[in-house]
Image: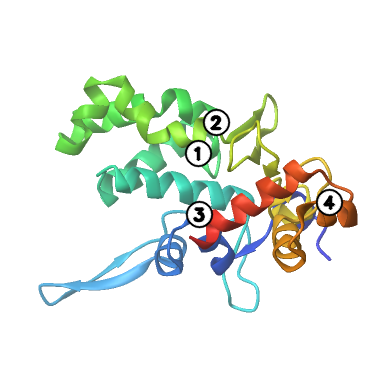
Amino acid sequence: MNLTYFNTGIYTVRDAARLTGVSTGRIRRWLRGYRYRSRKKAYASPPLWHGQWEPIDRSLALGFLDLIEILFVDAFLKAGITWTTMRQARERAQEMFKVSHPFCTNRFVTDGREIFMELHRKTGEPSLIDIVKRQHVFVQIIKPFLRELEFAEHSGLVGWWPLGEKRHVVLDPKRNFGRPIVARHGVPTEVLASAAKAAGSVAEVARWYEVTEVEIHDAVEFEQRLAA
């Protein structure tokens, strides 16, 4: 077993799609690139970034930082930022921060708007005007992540709390290969949610796994969100 797996997290494309809500096809295109034709000409779009893992048995494998990068890319595309500008913003951030996954850095939370302002001055892209003129628009785009991502001062991104940091569900790349768990006891949310459904008693499951009923309720809520 590669010991790095214990620190980086490892997910299949299907896992990543389930956790982020982004389709498997889009994730593969972002990490593998793709070819397309326009007006009888063939074009190739290179990968937006290279994943933390080399393919395993020819299948893409993703790390924890890949997972969070997917969330940010999806959020900006939904906000109307074009694919070209997204690529340029990511490349600029990567150059500035000297890291492989720039959207996963705390610096991007504070400096990201400046990057888009810089690109707007160069390209004049209309969809960037609001970000340039109004700080709250940029904050609105990344707001869901501000309460969910945990950064450590010297080690960068260390956790994703998908229900918020005051709740009990966390994805920590150093625990359970980065799979969702209840933070205090480390039991996978999928296990607790399945057990609660099968037993029909939260109190009984809490006794089986020696966790609190609140942890089980959070695990069930999280798994239900993924299934919705």
Number of residue marks: 4
Type of the residue with mark 3: Thr
The Cα–Cα distance between marks 3 and 2, rounded to whole angstroms, is 16 Å
Q: Position of residue 156 (x, y in %)?
A: 64, 33
State which tag comes first along the sequence, 2 or 1: 1
User: Residue at label 2?
Assistant: 147
State which tag comes first along the sequence, 3 or 2: 3
User: Residue at label 4?
Assistant: 206
State which tag comes first along the sequence, 3 or 1: 3
Q: Position of residue 77 (x, y in %)?
A: 31, 48
Q: Position of residue 142 (x, y in %)?
A: 42, 34
Classify mark 2: residues with Cα within 10 Å, few (<14), some (14-19) or many (20+).
some
The Cα–Cα distance between marks 3 and 1, rounded to whole angstroms, is 18 Å
Q: Are marks 3 and 1 in contact (CB under 8 Å)?
A: no
- Identify the residue at horizontal 65%, vertical 54% (top origin): 220
The Cα–Cα distance between marks 4 and 3, rounded to whole angstroms, is 28 Å
User: Residue at label 3?
Assistant: 20
Query: Extreme left residue here?
Result: 39
Q: Is residue 180 above or below residue 163?
A: below
